[in-house]
Image (spheres, coloured by chain):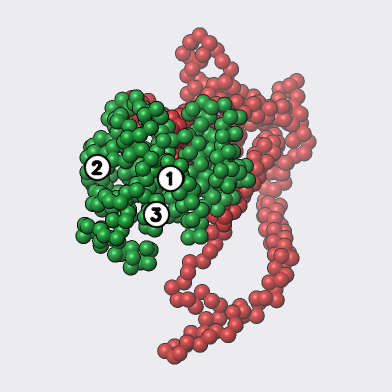
Amino acid sequence: MSAGPAATAGGEAVRIEGLHKSFGENKVLTGIDLAVASHEVVCLIGASGSGKSTLLRCINLLEPIDAGTVWLWGSQITGPGIDHNKVRRYIGIVFQSFNLFPHMTVLRNVTLAPAKVLGIPKGEAEEEARSLLRRFGLLDKADDYPDRLSGGQQQRVAIVRALAMKPQIMLLDEVTSALDPELVSEVLDVIRELAAGGMTMLIATHEMGFARDIARRVCFLEEGRIIEDAPPAELFSNPRDERTQRFLRRIVDAGRM
Amino acid sequence: MDDARQPEPPVDPLAGLAGASARTVGGAWQPPGTFASGGRGPKLFSAEGRRGTVISTVSTIIVLAALVAIFLLAPGAKAVEHAFFSPSHMWAAFIGNPKQGYYSVGAAIWLNIRMFVVAEIFILAFALVIALIRQSTHPALFPIRVISTGYVDFFRGVPLILVIFAIGLGVPALNLPVVSNQSNAVYGVTALVLSYSAYVSEVYRAGLNSVHQSQVAAARSLGLPHWTALRYVILPQAVRNIIPPLLNDFISLQKDTALVGILGTIEANKAADIYSEQVFNFSSFTVAAILFLILTIPLARFTDRLIERDRRRRLAGAAA
């Protein structure tokens, strides 16, 4: 991979063509084509099992893909001879279930990767971590263990942990789905702040109102394919595909939009 | 433990209640009125603590008295008491007297302790290597993966006493330089390490499997290379989960150092054996037994405490 931060000034951050992924007999992704521009926020919506999470995990190379190609700033990251760890330095991912390291304090959760992967001296890494934690209102939790934190706080720490690696792209995998309703907004606020700061983001979400607010484009996935890809105003108010209409009708009926 | 004690929700919501007279046959539902358990409930409940202590004390005394009575009433009680529990013989065996041809059991236990400590260090390291090899997925490691699996199968299947014999008699017979000129204690420890590492590697493996795959994903997604993720994220959590079973194996190892005596090494059990042969009294074995208990019981209590602490932490974590 020759591309790095220098290549991020503009243009296409992520390009995906013909991505296929199966788990055994279960075909999860059946031909995904998607491009995300730098500083663009794209939301992925769709029912559980439609392939949103798998798509994000494939971009982060956490799942080996069966067919297709992924480029980051024009450099191919799929195929043989790719240093996965190097790719992941530019892509942060946040999971539905936080996945903080339970045996480490919040501060150590955040500093581990900068210290061990980027080789940043401990003191410097801690200083940067503290300033990130301060920015997201978590500084007083720095020395706590994750199990002392609320779900919302844990998820914010997970975002900070990803940001500490200074990624150019953030992948958010249903980051509010495991939270109590009253804790959702504190996490969404953090994501809004990232969007305002120009972070390129690919967000799998069930929060339709949030997707409408934040996304430049919304992609509706069904059966491992992108059915419709449009600006939120268009997709939510005037969906063209029948399947999108059906999905959104169910969401409205459930009182979720 | 507490989780297990929670009753299954009964299919009939009233089936589990005492005084099930609340159910009427074919009639309208009647409220049960009181949930007291036949008059023995609330009043005694307040005295439960003291009452429990009294009951447990009395039952302990009865059981102990019964056991002592059985022993004392046995036809051979006097003979056994003299052969196994003679205070003067026990003291003599503990102190030892080389001029009389027997060794101090009290001094010999020191060798058991040293063998235990050395073996434990090697086992912890070697078993981890075996476990990591068996957990690896890289195709290039396939041959050593097969060898490791064979190793574990073999040493878990062969009795430890045979391994000790094989190493203790076989290796010196090979007449190799250095390797064949070691003391029997070294061969004994080698056999202990080979045998116990097979068990402990399986404990490690269980620990590694107990760490959720999402932790691996989280670590790798941050760009941590395989070994770094293993070292800082996976292993610390795995080891924490397996401390009780590990300590359990080490309690077992402490006792099994006695088996090395079959090679002629003067450890506590062998010293007791020599005493009994010289003096024709078995009280020396009682001394050895007491010394082993003094070693193992603190470790057992320590294990209990760790398990209890772990249980409380899990409950606290679940409540948070």
Q: Amino acid at mark 3?
A: Asp
Residue B110 rendering spot, x and y as whole percentages = 68, 27
Left or right, residue B235 beside residue B98: left
Question: Residue at image x 24%, y 43%?
Answer: A32
The red-tinted chain is B
The alpha-carbon separation of the residues under discs 1 and 2 comes to 23 Å
Q: Do discs 1 and 3 belong to a common subunit?
A: yes
Question: Residue at image x 39%, y 54%?
Answer: A213
Q: Residues within 10 Å of mark 3 (few under 14, many from 20)?
A: few
Indicate the secondary structure of the residue bearing disc 3.
helix
Q: Colour of chain A?
A: green
Q: Amino acid at mark 1?
A: Ala
Q: Chain of mark 3?
A: A
Q: Nearer the viewer, residue B77 or B148?
A: B148
Q: Residue furthest bottom?
A: B27
Q: Amino acid at mark 2?
A: Asp
Q: Label for residue A213?
A: 3
Q: Residues within 10 Å of mark 2 (few under 14, many from 20)?
A: some
Cβ–Cβ below 8 Å for labels 1 and 3?
A: no
| For discs 1 and 2, the disc positioned in front in the rendered view | 1
